[in-house]
Amino acid sequence: MVKKMRVENTESQARLVCIHQPDFFPWLGFFDKMLRSDIFILLDHVQFPKTGGTYCNRVKLKVGSQGQWVTAPVNRSYNGLLPIKEVEFQPKNPWREKMFKTILSNYRGALFFDEAMQMLEPLIRNPEDSISTYNTHAVLMIGKYLNMPSDHIRWSSRLLCEGASTELLISLTRAVGGTTYMCGSGAINYQNDVLFAQAGVNLIHRDYSHPIYQQGSGKDFIAGLSIIDALMHVGIDGVRELLGSGGVGR
């Protein structure tokens, strides 16, 4: 149940809301949601898993002919559970340099390597310890290069909503004056669609169709890689085209 909620003052028009955890150099589907939404909420107040992998600190890049995980190790020395916004990277771990070298080794020959690295190197080397702050900065800066708006970004930790699973998504949507919530295909594993109708919130399922582009000399396309891969192979203008509408508007 929702105990408290801050509601934004909004106009009467419909507002489409998307909600996503602050992922680590995420894939194109993340930016597709960001572009299509009227309000994009970064889910930074939910618990970070004590064990196992998460897209908040790892992503796949093309290494050789395969997609391979690149991970930013997290400091797990804390007791109990922490929200994403309070979790930090492992101190003194040289993962940034390792990731940078992995990109150099595997993308040096990419058509737009120089253009992409000029943008990505300062984002990768960012010394920020907070995974949420680090990831959000990278996402917003990449979005800026792609001419994507950022004034529609909100943080769940600032909206004072409570609840779990579907109830939380509904509460967050309503807190920003949303009339429609758009989810991805993975939502079927945890989401109760009926609750949206009961709450008077329209629901859109978007099964993202990953665009295919030339990934170097390889014959088989690997979907779901970090946006880094697309930036390397098709460049900033090419990524705008892959996302539709040139990266402008929603």
Image: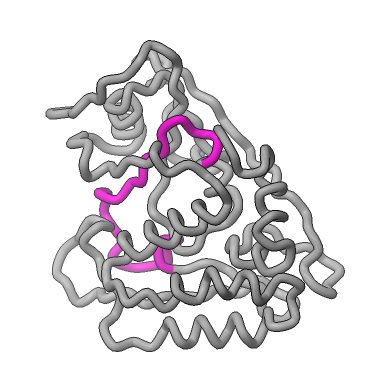
Quadrant position of residue 113: bottom right
Quadrant position of residue 199: top left
Magenta segment main secondary structure: loop
15 inside magenta stretch = no
Q: Identify the residue shown where x is 52% and y is 83%.
A: 100
Is there any visible trace of residue 216 in the rendered image?
yes
* Image-based side of 16 in relation to 102, left or right: left
Magenta part of the protein: which range?
35-57
Quarter of the rendering occupied by the C terminus = top right
Q: Position of residue 149 (x, y in %)?
A: 48, 41
Q: Nearer the viewer, residue 186 or 135?
A: 135
Q: Identify the residue shown where x is 53% and y is 43%.
A: 186
Is there any visible trace of residue 1 in the rendered image?
no
Q: Position of residue 40 (x, y in %)?
A: 41, 38
Q: Is residue 164 above or below residue 123?
A: above
Q: Is residue 58 above or below residue 2?
A: below
Quadrant position of residue 117: bottom right
Q: Identify the residue shown where x is 64% and y is 41%.
A: 208
Model colouring:
one colour
